[in-house]
Image (cartoon, rainbow, N blue to C red):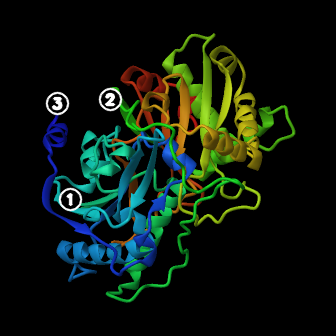
Amino acid sequence: MDEGSLNMSSAIVKQISECFIKPKHEVQEAKHPYYLGPLDIAFLFGNYIQKGLLFHKPPTSEHQNFSIHKLIESLKNSLSITLVHFYPLAGQLVTQVDEARHQSLIFVDCNKGPGARFIHAMLDLSVSDILSPIDVPVVIKSLFDHNRAVNYDGHYKPLLSVQVTELFDGVFIGCSMNHSIGDGTSYWHFWNMWSEIHRANCNDEIVPLSRIPIHKRWFPDGYSPVVHLPFTNPKEGLSPSETPDLRERIFHFSPESLAKLKSKANAENNTKNTISSFQALSALCWRTIIRALALPHDHVTNCKLPANFRHRLDPPLSQDSVGNYLTLAIATTKVGELLEHDLGWAASLVHQAVMNQKHEVFHDFVSSWLQSPFIIPIHKLSDSYSVHMGSSPRFDMYGNEFGLGKAVAVRSGYANKFVGKVTSYPGCEGKGSVDLEVCLPFDAMTILELDEEFMNVVS
């Protein structure tokens, strides 16, 4: 082991301080129970969302007055104002049990608990220590609070936790948000508004937002927005979940490389459909990751992509609607067929799966769930024979600046990591570039790194 690797492996995050943040002003709506939507409840056994931004410290010559303590105080103040708009994140989950009716009701008590947790920490590493290694360093997981927590833990853990970790020459801001409050669209909406409020540099005044969050949950006509679960022990089915020992690596794809991949997929596509760049990229991941996993050819395999249903509903919902409004678009075939056909064939399956996500699909699923509500057992949230594309390069991640300039990278924590998970981010340089965080067993990752079809597209 060289000296750099030794330093990385021995680096420990040291907590400097911890406090809890409440909304800056009293929120009238927070006095009432905040009821969860169908998918919010169904995924209560899933993990928190954990994403973070890595920044360089401003050069001393440009910012003579830069101070980590001033940054911490400004982040706390702007977060307090942001929580006025995203007030459920300052509360805690509550379960009311009706033994006589054999029912339970889970909701957010916005006034229960100490608020959102805010941690200031320090790590004796540099920005290059985080970015230079081929694999994502294990220490990244220590830059987030709520390690291994599931959404149901929001009964006694904060629904939102922010950890600001100072490096030698940088700052990492890691945010853990309970997934029962919102999906990726809501998560980055929160980040964007926090950044917007921070830029306004306001102390007490409520800042007018460009995108005001809408907290009313969508339900099909005829259904009550208060969901009573048909059991008294919601924790049944909740068991510890261990992530297997995986390698995590970031692969970068330039706009030019993605354009060539899209062109190839459409040239090989025998249908009249136009394959998008991301559909082509997802198909590439599906083929090459499944090949690296060396699964039996008669095994069924899936490519799963999250589909945001806000704009697919009729009438559509605003993208500022807070909650979980997504399902999985699932392309399915057998391993042998996937590998025997070309990229265009796989991409056409992915395209069709996405196009099938219409209003009726979401409406019928939610209606069926409301007739017989359940919480998905944690072991059913992933499998080892599929590729699961998570997050989206469309989210505005690099637009979040906190007086530190543009971030140099996005990274994720422990949450939602399993074999075949691929998390997508916009590339730091923008212009349609994409970064993919791929999680695979060690031997499978080595095979992927030698796969010409895949590596020829990596920039």
Quadrant where the N terminus is found in the figure: top left
How dense is the environment of label 1, judged by Cα within 10 Å: few (below 14), some, or many (20 and up)?
many
Q: Amino acid at mark 1?
A: Leu
Q: Position of residue 443 (x, y in %)?
A: 39, 20
- Report whether 241 appears left or right of 448: left
Which quarter of the figure has residue 4? top left
- The residue indicated by pointer 2 is 242
Give the mark nearer the N terminus: 3 vs 2.
3
Q: Amino acid at mark 2?
A: Glu
As drawn, the residue found furthest toward the bottom would be 205
Q: Amino acid at mark 3?
A: Met
Label 1 to label 3: alpha-carbon separation = 23 Å
Is residue 91 placed above or below 31 in the rendered structure?
A: above
* Residue 72 in view, yes or no: yes
Is residue 215 placed above or below 350 in the rendered structure?
A: below
Between 330 and 427, the one nearer to me in the picture: 330
Q: Name which residue lies at 55% across and 23% down.
A: 290
- The disc placed on residue 1 is 3
- The disc placed on residue 298 is none
